[in-house]
């Protein structure tokens, strides 16, 4: 909020309390609420009225507070999420419904959703579903897929509010509410922008407007003279080790674009600082550090940077063809890495096959679209005589952040303390460090706390995307429809820096033949450097792109053989006892066949209904009610290896029994909305034999928790879940030993005592009198789990994952053949999850994945410089998501906690190809590029004279 403008007193009511604010009338209401009144429950996702996270009630009607001026509120009533609960702390009925139905996942949009729904319910206590959709249409959610939110709002009118806590030993498989849900529902949860030390300076990066350019920095002294509030300008010369990256042998990304200088005298804050180059639009060149007002006043154009733009190589084909000046000297062909899997002889098998299907496929950049932009703070401090740096920020991987920041600052890892904030969505995009190294470098150099928040355009232009892919693919089968071979060749545009390109290039060949038994496979990939946006991890690591190709070709083969599309997949579904493309024989938990069987009744019904609808539509003359509409149904399958590919993937969990009679769970696995805080605690509770209510938790703090690995690759439920079970079992055994009770004794914590009841009666230990460690714990249990895998050889043979998730989804769509628009009518999603640790959370993950898959299929197309905001970049809204029927298949994984395995990424992968199959069924048009936007689909319809 700008304080440089003249301030005037403005009186208003906020949450029933009279307040007077001294600020200029043009100040944003959102900034006044957050900065002046410290009501940080109102979240900022865009500052442009596009996301709705900042929604509040103004005289009981919903408004986006980021586009409402304070002067408009004079004498009026404002209600924020902090004002919804009763004065005694009881949740409102709406908040209670959200809690019960799992309507808050990451929670960053939740305050906005609650306020929009409150507006509706105050005007209409019994809305129907369409009225709920209309009321929530101005608030974006990237996690939930909206269905749980709609359920919750409708439940208020039905009085469906009661929550039953699972009893001791029965937490796994229940619908336990999120243990961090109340904080998300009341505005108490603290995200990266919600907290910073008093007196923190602010940081703002200055970024390249060019995709490829040389630049020089001039003399900074005039800028300091003009702006006394400017404390420092940080450049690459202030970074002890100006490179970072995901992999030990690829540290190719700078904190600030690297510059050289002839004289060291020019490297201080008052001097100039040499020349350098940038490799993508949005790359950080330097950062301004000072007070907030000063940073607002300094335009990027005022910073003395001279640019020499160069011709950019924006796609893989350009970069492969033009290697005269490679992006990185160590990669003269502009290829980061190659991936390869070979089993049998695919070429020979295809040549001899009865039927062959082939095609070229491509996909666009896709933006993660989490509603919380990157934010946090860093502070330098001394502890026990050791200089340290603390970073509080939104991250999916605190230990990787710790190690990279230690490397950048040339510190020991123990000198870096990472505290994850609540994470407002991630989906892989917050696996890479973004704002953290800039904050750490600035705070370390200046010696004062430094905070920062990316703007929405800054977040979108500078952070990673889903890899665009170009793929040439062939599949072959025999006369009976049994698959014989798959050949896949794919290039993946990794952008200016490696990020997770290595993982994508290596994961895709393993999955490229699909979740089917295919005796002959050849799959080759290349991750290619370009001057486009950095491509990184995004919910699937390249598997969604390759799945679009193989599912389209399976539809081709089904048509050639005359076999129903679902049946074709069913006869080829890989089963336990069969070998994958890497030669790994699946020993258990391969439930694809069960997924397809679960869809079959709905599949047959939808086919009949679509056929009847199309017959009527086709018979109508021009101008008929449905003459321009066609309906179709599609099916697609997926599989996904849970965890890292063929490398160590450990997680360690710890739980302690305190002298106060509580269990403290030290959980290093970051919850980014998927619910791991809750599901891992459920596992721990059952392993100990206590109710969840006896357990407190700490998440992700690198000083307090052990390394649980990154929250990605659908690994936390499987890997950290097993570690949690082991920790709980060890702690239980020690509690049993302490009480000298029988192994199957019932345990409880009561009034600070540990009580064990067995056949001999009740045994009680007063914990306050027991000796304890430095944490105040009488006993502890620790568990470590590292899934058994084997590295892949030169032909990609080995055991890359210990277990795989499987799914089949079907989509029903309605296509307007005159406009090229597609309306998804219903999704059926059958997922083999091994064991559903929490039914509500698993359903929510499937809903959210389906929503992102719908966006991938129909609308999401990131273009640097054109769609760097939430207005021009289209993501699904509540009105785009159809009813979703979830079928949970529980084919237990012996290694997983109580049989569980992952579902986060699998939830997305089959949706887009199922939608494309349905469009094809409706119109005959084959989609070979995602997304199928109306203009693209309309052209295909015209080309085929549909």
Image (spheres, grey):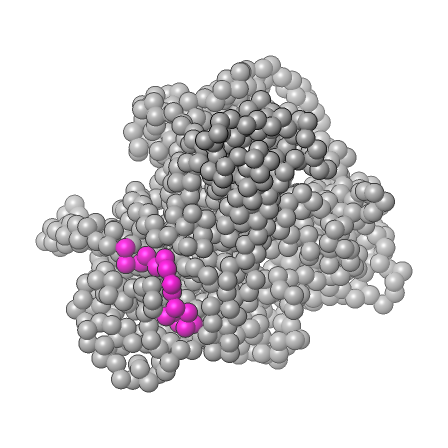
Magenta span: chief secondary structure: loop
Q: Residue at x 59, y 43 (%)?
A: 781
> Can you tell which quarter of the image residue 786 is in?
bottom right
Q: Residue at x 57, y 19 (%)?
A: 14
Above or below: residue 508 compared with residue 738: below
Q: Residue at x 45, y 31 (%)?
A: 759
Picture coordinates of residue 731 (x, y %)?
Answer: 57, 41
Query: Considering depth in this image, is 842 or 143 the residue closer to the camera?
Result: 842
Can residue 337 be found in the magenta stretch? no
Residue situated furthest right in the rendering: 265
Above or below: residue 80 compared with residue 668: above
Instruction: Say whether residue 367 is left or right of residue 22.
Output: left
Q: Which residues are magenta?
A: 579-594
Residue situated furthest front in the rendering: 760
Picture coordinates of residue 283 (x, y %)?
Answer: 64, 58
Number of marks drawn? 0
Residue situated furthest left in the rendering: 619
Visible residue check, residue 130: yes
Visible residue check, residue 617: no
Q: Quadrant of the N terminus?
A: top right
Above or below: residue 935 compared with residue 178: below
Picture coordinates of residue 439 (x, y %)?
Answer: 72, 48
Picture coordinates of residue 131 (x, y %)?
Answer: 32, 30
Query: Considering depth in this image, is 730 or 656 the residue closer to the camera?
Result: 730
Q: Residue at x 75, y 33 (%)?
A: 198
Q: Quadrant of the C terminus?
A: bottom left
Can residue 587 be found in the magenta stretch? yes
């Amino acid at each position: 909020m700008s304080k440089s403008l003249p301030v005037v007193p403005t009186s208003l009511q906020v949450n029933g309390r009279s307040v007077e604010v001294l600020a200029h009338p043009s100040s944003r209401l959102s900034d006044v609420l957050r900065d002046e009144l410290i009501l940080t429950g109102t979240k900022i996702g865009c500052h442009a009225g596009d996301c709705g996270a900042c929604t509040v009630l103004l005289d009981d009607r919903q408004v986006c507070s980021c586009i409402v001026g304070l002067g408009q509120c004079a004498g009026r009533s404002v209600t924020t999420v902090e004002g919804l609960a009763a004065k005694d702390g009881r949740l409102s009925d709406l908040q209670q419904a959200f809690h019960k139905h799992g309507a808050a996942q990451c929670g960053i949009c939740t305050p906005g959703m609650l306020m929009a729904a409150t507006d509706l319910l105050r005007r209409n206590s019994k809305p129907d579903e369409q009225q709920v959709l209309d009321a929530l249409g101005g608030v974006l959610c990237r996690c939930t897929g909206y269905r749980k939110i709609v359920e919750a709002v409708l439940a208020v009118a039905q009085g469906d509010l009661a929550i039953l806590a699972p009893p001791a030993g029965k937490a796994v498989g229940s619908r336990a509410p999120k243990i961090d849900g109340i904080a998300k529902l009341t505005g108490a949860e603290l995200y990266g922008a919600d907290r910073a030390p008093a007196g923190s300076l602010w940081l703002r990066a200055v970024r390249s407007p060019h995709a490829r350019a040389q630049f020089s920095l001039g003399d900074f002294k005039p800028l300091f003279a003009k702006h006394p509030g400017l404390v420092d300008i940080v450049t690459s010369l202030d970074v002890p080790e100006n490179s970072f990256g995901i992999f030990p042998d690829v540290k190719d990304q700078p904190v600030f674009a690297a510059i050289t200088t002839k004289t060291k005298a020019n490297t201080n804050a008052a001097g100039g600082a040499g020349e350098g180059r940038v490799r993508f639009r949005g790359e950080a060149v330097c950062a301004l550090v000072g007070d907030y007002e000063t940073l607002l006043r300094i335009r990027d154009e005022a910073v003395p940077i001279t640019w020499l733009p160069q011709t950019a190589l924006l796609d893989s084909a350009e970069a492969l063809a033009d290697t005269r000046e490679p992006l990185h000297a160590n990669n003269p062909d502009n290829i980061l890495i190659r991936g390869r899997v070979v089993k049998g002889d695919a070429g020979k098998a295809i040549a001899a096959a009865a039927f062959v299907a082939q095609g070229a496929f491509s996909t666009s950049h896709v933006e993660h679209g989490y509603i919380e932009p990157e934010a946090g703070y860093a502070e330098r401090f001394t502890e026990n005589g050791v200089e340290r740096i603390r970073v509080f920020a939104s991250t999916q991987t605190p230990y990787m952040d710790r190690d990279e920041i230690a490397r950048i600052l040339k510190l020991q890892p123990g000198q870096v303390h990472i505290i994850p904030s609540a994470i407002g969505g991630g989906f892989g995009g917050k696996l890479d460090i973004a704002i953290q190294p800039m904050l750490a470098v600035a705070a370390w150099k200046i010696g004062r706390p430094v905070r920062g928040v990316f703007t929405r355009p800054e977040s979108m232009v500078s952070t990673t995307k889903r890899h665009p892919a170009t793929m040439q693919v062939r599949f072959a089968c025999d006369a009976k429809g049994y698959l014989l071979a798959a050949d896949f060749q794919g290039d993946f545009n990794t952008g200016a820096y490696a990020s997770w390109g290595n993982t994508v290039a290596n994961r895709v060949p393993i999955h490229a033949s699909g979740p089917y038994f295919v005796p002959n496979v050849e799959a080759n990939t290349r991750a290619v450097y370009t001057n486009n946006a950095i491509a990184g991890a995004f919910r699937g690591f390249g598997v969604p792109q390759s799945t679009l190709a193989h599912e389209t070709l399976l539809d081709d083969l089904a048509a050639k053989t005359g076999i129903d599309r679902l049946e074709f997949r069913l006869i080829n579904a890989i089963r336990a006892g069969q070998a994958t493309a890497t030669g790994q024989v699946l020993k258990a938990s391969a439930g694809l066949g069960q997924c397809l069987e679960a869809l079959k009744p709905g599949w047959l019904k939808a086919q009949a209904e679509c056929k009847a609808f199309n017959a009527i539509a086709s018979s109508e003359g021009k101008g008929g009610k449905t003459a321009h509409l066609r309906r179709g149904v599609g099916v697609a399958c997926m599989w996904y290896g849970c965890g890292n590919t063929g490398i160590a993937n450990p997680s360690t969990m710890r739980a302690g029994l305190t002298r106060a009679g509580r269990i403290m769970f030290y959980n290093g696995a970051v919850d980014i909305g998927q619910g791991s805080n809750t599901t891992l605690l459920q596992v721990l509770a059952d392993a100990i034999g206590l109710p969840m209510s006896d357990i407190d938790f700490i998440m992700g703090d690198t000083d307090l928790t052990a390394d649980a690995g990154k929250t990605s690759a659908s690994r936390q439920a499987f890997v950290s879940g097993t570690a949690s079970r082991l920790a709980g079992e060890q702690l239980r055994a020690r509690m049993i030993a302490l009480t000298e009770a029988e192994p199957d004794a019932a345990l409880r914590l009561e009034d600070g005592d540990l009580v064990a009841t067995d056949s001999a009666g009740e045994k009680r230990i007063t914990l306050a009198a027991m000796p304890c460690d430095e944490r105040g714990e009488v006993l502890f249990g620790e568990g470590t789990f590292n899934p058994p895998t084997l590295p892949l050889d030169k032909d990609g043979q080995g055991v890359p994952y210990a277990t795989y998730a499987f799914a089949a989804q079907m989509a029903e769509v309605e296509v307007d053949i005159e406009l090229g628009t597609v309306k998804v009518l219903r999704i059926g999603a059958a997922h083999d999850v091994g064991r559903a640790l929490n039914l509500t959370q698993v359903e929510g993950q499937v809903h959210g994945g389906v929503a992102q898959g719908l966006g991938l299929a129909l609308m999401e197309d990131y273009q640097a410089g054109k769609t760097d905001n939430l207005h021009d970049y289209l993501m699904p809204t509540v009105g785009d998501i159809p009813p979703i029927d979830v079928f949970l298949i529980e084919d237990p994984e012996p290694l997983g906690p109580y049989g569980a395995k992952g579902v986060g990424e699998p939830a997305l992968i089959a949706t887009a190809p199922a939608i494309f199959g349905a469009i094809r069924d409706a119109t005959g048009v084959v989609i070979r590029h995602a997304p199928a936007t109306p203009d693209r689909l309309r052209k295909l319809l015209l080309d085929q004279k549909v």
